[in-house]
Amino acid sequence: MVVTGLDVPAFEKVPAWVAERLRARVDRAADELLHELRERGTGPDGGDEERRVRSGIAAALRHFCDLVDDPNAGWGRVQAFYLRVGRHMAREGRDPDETQQALRRSALAVWRTLATVPGGLDLDHAALGLVVDAQFAYMDAVAEVIADGYRGELRDHTAGPRDIDARRRARLLHLLLAEPPADPDRVEALAREARWPRPRTVAAAAARPRGDGAVPPHAAPPGVLADFGAPEPALLFPDAADGARPVLPDELLRDWVVAIGPAVPLAGAARSLRWARETLALAGRGLIPDTGPIRSAEHVPALVISRAGELIDDAAATRLAPLRGIPPARRERLAETLLALLEHNFNAADAGRRLCVHPQTVRYRLRHLQHLFGDDLRDPRRCLELELILRRTLSTC
């Protein structure tokens, strides 16, 4: 059976556990391949291009795994993603043949991963042949979808000054979000062409669809630069530091998860987007709510923990040592109580409401914690460390 260009049987024949083991190594595989490309002198030069290449490799690997898991259901998501890629390339004036190199890179990452998993994947020659067939079927189908998106974008934007302005604004958006920052004179010239008055401050946002049926909005809010057709959709809000928060239509928030970075000077738009993307990733992992517009500034502890995860994990062994000898169930209750107290400035009543227990119970546990931790609970710096450690430790339990 064929599903709109995809050879489904090629994926149905691949053992399901191949995808499970590949998926666990996606990020490592992308990093290792980038390192190898740099060593050969054929990799990206860094900055925004390197981030885009790495993101493309990781996305291709995950999509391949999705198709092995369920080719019929998975292809709809993969197809929608690469249609956006094709449209985005057309808007940027890039050659669609670039995708062949990207697809070859993803295939190379698959082969390298199969060869380097500790203990191997126990694939015999027949099973390996099935993976090879599926990989080539994937490359053919994706290349066709990208070409369709590319042609569709060209058809949709061949007339009218409004369409020309939209293309110019999309190019301007990606120029402002590029790393390293683009030449200011080039930004000024393109902003004039796109009829976009340059604001003093901006806030960038990252977006992802809530489901397969999410439809990009027909137009961005006034003054907002937006590209929902890009592989990683982004927006740029003007004058976000003037006290007014960016306002998004309800219908947009119904279909899309949107994370908004901090307000920065125009030249720092890429920095704001980095924080927006990290915030969006946290929401995707269920670590913060994804309802309404998600603002990075309201989730600073979670972002700090995400950035310094390994360091916090290393510090946890020392800072939480006083709890080590407590039985597991009681240890978890004490840890949750300590976090609630730290979050509420040691107010037992507020911590009790947070934990749904009586304040007297909180005070009893606090006395036990004071006995265990001693002067550390009187030191603001130690308390901050403990709060970060406990937030990470309890979120991963």
Image (tube, rainbow, N blue to C red):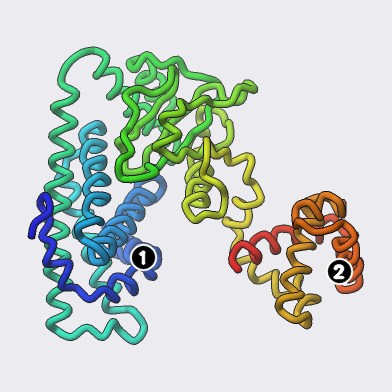
* Residue at the (64%, 69%) spot, across then down: 313
Q: Nearer the viewer, residue 164 or 340?
A: 340
| Upstream in sequence: badge 1 or badge 2 | 1
Q: Position of residue 178 (x, y in %)?
A: 41, 37
Decide: is 298 above or below 382: above
Query: For the residue carrying disc 1, how many other residues have a C-alpha within 10 Å: few (<14), some (14-19), or many (20+)?
Result: many
The residue that mark 1 highlights is 26
The tag on residue 62 is none
Q: Position of residue 365 (x, y in %)?
A: 86, 67
In the shown orientation, is residue 105 left or right of residue 221? left
The residue that mark 2 highlights is 369
Mark 1 residue element: helix
Please state which amino acid type lies under the numbered disc 2: Leu
What whole-number distance in Å separates the C-alpha atoms at marks 1 and 2? 41 Å
* Residue at the (35%, 32%) spot, across then down: 227
* Residue at the (23%, 72%) spot, across then down: 111
| Viewer-nearest of discs 1 and 2 | 2
In the shown orientation, is residue 67 left or right of residue 175? left
